[in-house]
Image (tube, coloured by chain):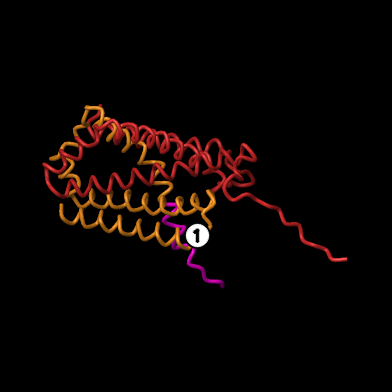
Chain colours: A red, B orange
Amino acid sequence: MSRRPLVREVPPTTWFFRHPRYLRYMSREITSIFVGAYCVLLVIGLQRLAAGPVAWEGFLLALTSPGSIVFQFLALIAAVYHAATWFNATHKAMPIQIGEDFVPGKVISGAHYVAWAALSAAILHLAGVF
Amino acid sequence: MAKSHKPVVWFPFAAGGTVIAFFIPVIVVLTLMAALGHVPVALGYERMHAFAASGLGKLAIFGVVALSLWSSAHRLRCTCYDFGLRADTLAATVLYIAALAASLSVALSLLKI
């Protein structure tokens, strides 16, 4: 009698519908598509900036198209979701031990959120938004 | 000790993930404001050009964009695999070359400014 190894068939394209946890994982994976596309937008913007004032104004004008606005809203949601999940994971990626005890995860993640808020406010202020 | 090329891919990925988390949301807010007709002062040509012309500005722009690109390329590679594209070497090659080319383009743009 031969003992055959257990082979689990995993559907390569629909596996993530099997468990809510996989869906949450995939929803985070998908943010990379929008963030990646937005990075390409930044690269194009820098090319326009290097090409002179007329090209830059054209770039700013192109940003105002409805499609661009919808894309940027999606990119904003994706970027914020990426940031939140990234900061939530920080205490798993780099736990800090003081003496016998570990610093609570909420403190580590919380510190990242505070730094994020401060940095964003500083950049908005420097950019002349307020 | 076993040698691996993974740290080379992984370090910029982790650094890029952090850079994206801290900087990309606020940058999207700025371009979105411009898109909605309230162009932030810093996105005017003079201010933007002056920022990109300074050494610190060049370093900041290149650091943020290049690390974000690399991290995105690495994550897109994983996303391709998770969606059932099993040609990982192909996906990795295409995406990493795209990230390198885009980073090179950023460097060239910054050198021109």
Image position of B63 with respect to A59: above or below:
below
Q: Which residues are magenta?
A: B1-15
Check the residue under mark 1 and report the chain it is in.
B
| Residue B99 x %, y % | 35, 56
Q: Is residue B19 left or right of residue B31?
A: right
Residue A17 drawn in magenta: no
Instruction: Identify the residue at image location x=31%, y=34%.
Output: A67
Q: Residues within 10 Å of mark 1 (few under 14, many from 20)?
A: few
Q: Main secondary structure of the magenta part?
A: helix
Identify which residue, A46 or B3, lies in the foreground. A46
Q: Is residue B60 left or right of residue A53?
A: right
Under circle 1, the secondary element is: helix
Identify which residue, B22 or B83, lies in the foreground. B83
Which residue type carries mark 1?
Asp
Q: How many marks?
A: 1
The residue pinned by badge 1 equals B88
Instruction: Identify the residue at image location x=22%, y=37%.
Output: A62
Q: Is residue B60 left or right of residue A91?
A: left
Q: Which quadrant of the view contains residue B97? A: bottom left
Image position of B90 with respect to A104: above or below:
below
Identify which residue, B19 or B102, lies in the foreground. B102
Q: Is residue A1 left or right of residue A83?
A: right
Instruction: Identify the residue at image location x=56%, y=71%.
Output: B2
